[in-house]
């Protein structure tokens, strides 16, 4: 895919990321669970060209009781799952046990980032027991695994209202928001048991709640407490169970488990994915020892997917040592461009972001690395600003254009005005950068420094904001800005990550 296609796909993936984080919020705040991200990047929308063949995992894991959760956020709410008859690609593959939960919710993508509504929950066992009555779509092409869509019959009202109950004619009765009473009798055509998911008096918003369906609702969503035996899990022959235990120990204060993590981290016979997670868990408490153990697997001789996963794991470690390692990886010209771009992204968007270290990567000869480095810079320090002004006045077009874009994207109006007023070679690039920023931003921040002559020079460039034929379809930086949704994998919450910065949702560190 190109940058435009990546950006379009990132908008779609954002629904899933927000949905998983919303499910984590509800499980934690309402039902006492302690969920973390189980499938790496389940709560992120970054699109990478190099795909990592991970263990197939649920989105979330409760580190108290071991509950696993799959979240499904779609623009149209329903009990809908993708399925293939190919072993390993069935709808309930990937480590979902009978007692584990699926969360279905509607995602409103009219704004960005999207917002997910209240989830509807069902156990794997309930979905399995009713799957015979789910409707199958026509299969997709063989190149897509002959995948089908399974739809369990349910009713999602397109209007808001209040649930009243079921009348003596077996019709669901609701009162809509206008006060009109409505009946829904079509559920009588469903095969198998039927269930109501609301109680009389419960209200619902348009398109946001499943009122009735054929899947039995769970008796309780409450966390039973510290019932998961992590010691037993880390010794399990099941790789999904072992990986879950290692992920859980990333957030647990369990010094007694350190020896077990050491064993997994150094075991040459362990699955490399689980070994990497153990090293990442240990790196959070002892980065000086374990960050090098992770970076040792990133070299030109290592499979690209293993290097990519190591880089993504390093970006989750909130320690300067991890960011320094990522910076070094980004500079290694013998590594694949995707690995280097991911490292640059981690320097600016990871748990221990350090944008100063991105300046060398912003001048990288490989465009994809340079694009990721520039897009990953959300703020500039005083030292960075001084360096960028030197680049702007250097006479080197690559440096000057890079500096202009970074200063414009970070809203550095005063620095650009200084360059325009004081630096002769920098003046055209400073003017260009102010034009990139847009009229309202410059007028607000420049105040009295926006002279008549400067305004007249900028106004033709600002006309692009009014040009309906102008778009950002071919702008790689705009496409990358859309890919900045990343919720904290160990302490997920939607409350902070929905805040939008200058260019998109800001990253959350542990």
Image (spheres, rainbow, N blue to C red):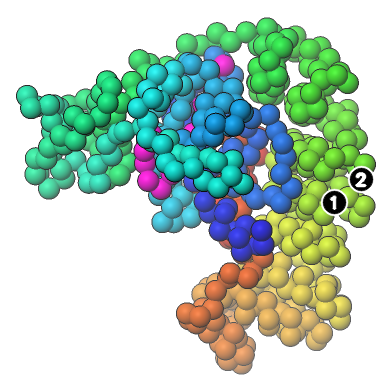
Specify whether residue 318 is painted magenta.
Answer: no
Residue at coordinates 48% horizontally, 39% vertically from top-left? 148
Residue in front for this viewpoint, 452 or 410: 410
In the picture provided, is 349 more to the left or to the right than 386? left
Residue at coordinates 27% horizontally, 20% vertically from top-left? 193
Q: Earlier in the sequence, mark 1 or mark 2?
A: 2
Which residue is labeled 1 in the image?
A: 336
Percent from the top left, x then y, of residue 159? 22, 46
Placement of 321 over or under 372, stated as above or below: above
Residue 4 falls in which quadrant of the image?
bottom right
Which residue is labeled 2 in the image?
A: 300
Residue at coordinates 55% horizontally, 8% vertically from top-left? 227
Q: Is residue 264 visible?
A: yes
Percent from the top left, x then y, of residue 346? 74, 47
Q: Residues within 10 Å of mark 1 (few under 14, many from 20)?
A: some
Look at the numbered discs 1 and 2 and tell me whether their residues touch, using CB distance below 8 Å.
yes
Q: CA distance from mark 1 to mark 2?
A: 7 Å
Q: Is residue 122 visible?
A: no
Percent from the top left, x then y, of residue 232? 68, 7
Placement of 193 over or under 91, stated as above or below: above
Q: Which residues are magenta?
A: 66-80
Residue in front for this viewpoint, 291 or 74: 74
Specify whether residue 69 is painted magenta.
Answer: yes
Q: Residues within 10 Å of mark 2 (few under 14, many from 20)?
A: few
């Amino acid at each position: 895919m190109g940058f435009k296609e990546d950006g379009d796909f990132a908008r779609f993936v954002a629904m899933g990321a927000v949905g998983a984080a919303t499910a984590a919020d509800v499980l934690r705040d309402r039902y006492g669970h302690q969920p973390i991200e189980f499938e790496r990047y389940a709560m992120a929308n970054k699109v990478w060209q190099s795909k990592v063949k991970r263990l197939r995992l649920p989105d979330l894991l409760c580190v108290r009781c071991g509950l696993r959760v799959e979240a499904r956020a779609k623009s149209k709410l329903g009990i809908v799952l993708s399925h293939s008859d190919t072993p390993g690609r069935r709808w309930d593959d990937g480590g979902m046990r009978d007692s584990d939960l699926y969360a279905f919710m509607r995602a409103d993508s009219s704004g960005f980032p999207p917002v997910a509504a209240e989830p509807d929950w069902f156990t794997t066992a309930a979905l399995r027991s009713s799957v015979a009555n789910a409707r199958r779509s026509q299969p997709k092409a063989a190149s897509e695994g002959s995948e089908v869509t399974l739809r369990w019959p349910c009713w999602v009202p397109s209007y808001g209202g209040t649930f009243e109950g079921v009348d003596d004619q077996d019709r669901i009765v609701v009162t809509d928001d206008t006060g009109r009473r409505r009946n829904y009798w079509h559920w009588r055509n469903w095969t198998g048991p039927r269930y109501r998911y609301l109680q009389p008096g419960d209200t619902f918003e348009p398109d946001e709640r499943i009122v009735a369906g054929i899947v039995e609702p769970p008796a309780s969503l409450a966390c039973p407490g510290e019932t998961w035996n992590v010691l037993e899990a880390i010794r399990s022959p099941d790789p999904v169970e072992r990986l879950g235990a290692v992920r859980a120990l990333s957030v647990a204060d369990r010094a007694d488990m350190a020896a077990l993590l050491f064993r997994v981290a150094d075991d040459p016979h362990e699955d490399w994915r689980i070994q990497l997670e153990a090293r990442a868990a240990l790196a959070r408490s002892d980065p000086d020892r374990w960050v090098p153990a992770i970076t040792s697997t990133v070299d030109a001789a290592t499979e690209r997917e293993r290097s990519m996963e190591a880089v993504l794991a390093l970006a989750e470690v909130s320690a300067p040592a991890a960011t320094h390692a990522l910076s070094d990886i980004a500079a290694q010209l013998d590594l694949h461009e995707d690995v280097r771009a991911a490292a640059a992204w981690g320097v600016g968007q990871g748990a221990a972001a350090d944008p100063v270290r991105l300046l060398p990567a912003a001048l990288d000869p490989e465009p994809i690395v340079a694009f990721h480095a520039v897009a990953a810079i959300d703020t500039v320090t005083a030292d960075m600003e001084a360096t960028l002004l030197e680049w702007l006045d250097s006479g080197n077009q690559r440096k000057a254009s890079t500096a202009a874009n970074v200063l414009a994207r970070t809203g550095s109006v005063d620095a650009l005005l200084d360059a325009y007023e004081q630096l002769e070679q920098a003046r055209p690039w400073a003017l260009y950068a102010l034009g990139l920023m847009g009229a309202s931003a410059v007028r607000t921040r420049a105040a009295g420094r926006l002279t008549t002559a400067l305004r007249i020079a900028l106004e033709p460039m600002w006309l692009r904001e009014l040009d309906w034929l102008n778009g950002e379809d071919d702008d790689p930086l705009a496409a990358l800005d859309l890919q900045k949704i990343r919720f904290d994998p160990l302490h997920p919450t939607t409350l902070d990550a929905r805040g939008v910065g200058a260019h998109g949702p800001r990253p959350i560190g542990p």
